[in-house]
Amino acid sequence: MLNVEHIGIAVKELEKSEKLFSALFNVAPYKRETVQSEKVSTSFFQINQTKIELLEATSPDSVIAGFIEKKGEGFHHIAFEVEDIESEMLRLQNEGFTLLNNVPKIGADNKLVCFLHPKSTNGILIELCQEIR
Ligand SMILES: C[C@@H](C(=O)O)C(=O)SCCNC(=O)CCNC(=O)[C@H](O)C(C)(C)COP(=O)(O)OP(=O)(O)OC[C@H]1O[C@@H](n2cnc3c(N)ncnc32)[C@H](O)[C@@H]1OP(=O)(O)O
Ligand SMILES: [Co+2]
């Protein structure tokens, strides 16, 4: 695994949270992107080397809506950059981690992504992402 690619934060209202985090980081979001397959609207902040992804549900059956209902707004996942997502998925599966998708999915910001079940990772939802080259 390489660097932390981004940290995902679940929010109820994207616009309201964009204002809050803009004030906190003293920088505006650099882009918004809806990922229909994940039923999320995202907004990205770049703070020096750190990327933060705000996630709002686009539908009541989005995992973000379910998460907020159970746990409330807040930290949702940590994403790690990988060089080769398929070989990393295979390696982690062989180590006994539970992959939530067996084929890489298209994520935001031009990435192939795969999630690991938090039950297999000490309660932390982990996303792997590889830049689409
Ligand atoms: C756009 C893209 C990108 O960056 O490119 C994104 O990030 S999309 C980001 C949104 N998409 C995703 O997160 C996709 C992968 N996530 C999923 O498939 C889901 O969220 C699961 C992780 C499988 C959870 O869904 P499920 O329907 O099973 O919900 P559930 O409420 O029944 O949760 C089952 C157990 O997992 C725990 N759980 C649920 N979400 C969690 C989270 N974010 N972090 C840590 N634990 C979590 C619950 O508390 C529960 O534990 P207990 O049983 O102990 O109560
Ligand atoms: Co993410």
Image (cartoon, grey):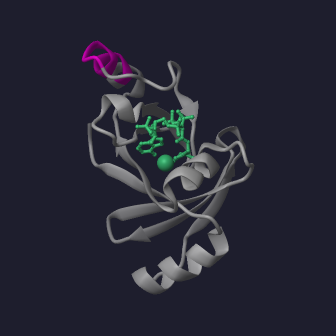
Q: Nearer the viewer, residue 121 or 126?
A: 121
Residue at 60%, 46% in the rendered image: 66
- For this view, does 72 lie left or right of residue 130? right
Q: What residue span does the magenta drawing correspond to?
A: 89-96
Q: Which residue is farthest front?
A: 70
Residue at 47%, 32% in the rendered image: 114
Rendered view: 58 above or below 81 = below
Quarter of the image that includes the N terminus: top left
Q: Nearer the viewer, residue 103 or 48?
A: 103
Q: Is residue 133 visible?
A: no
- For this view, does 94 lie left or right of residue 132? left
Q: Which residue is farthest top?
A: 94
Rendered view: 47 above or below 80 = below
Q: Is residue 116 visible?
A: yes
Q: Which residue is farthest right?
A: 59
Residue at 40%, 28% in the rendered image: 85
Rendered view: 95 above or below 81 = above
- For this view, does 98 lie left or right of residue 113? left
Residue 105 rendering spot, x and y as whole percentages = 57, 31
Residue 18 on the magenta span: no
Residue 55 rendering spot, x and y as whole percentages = 57, 57
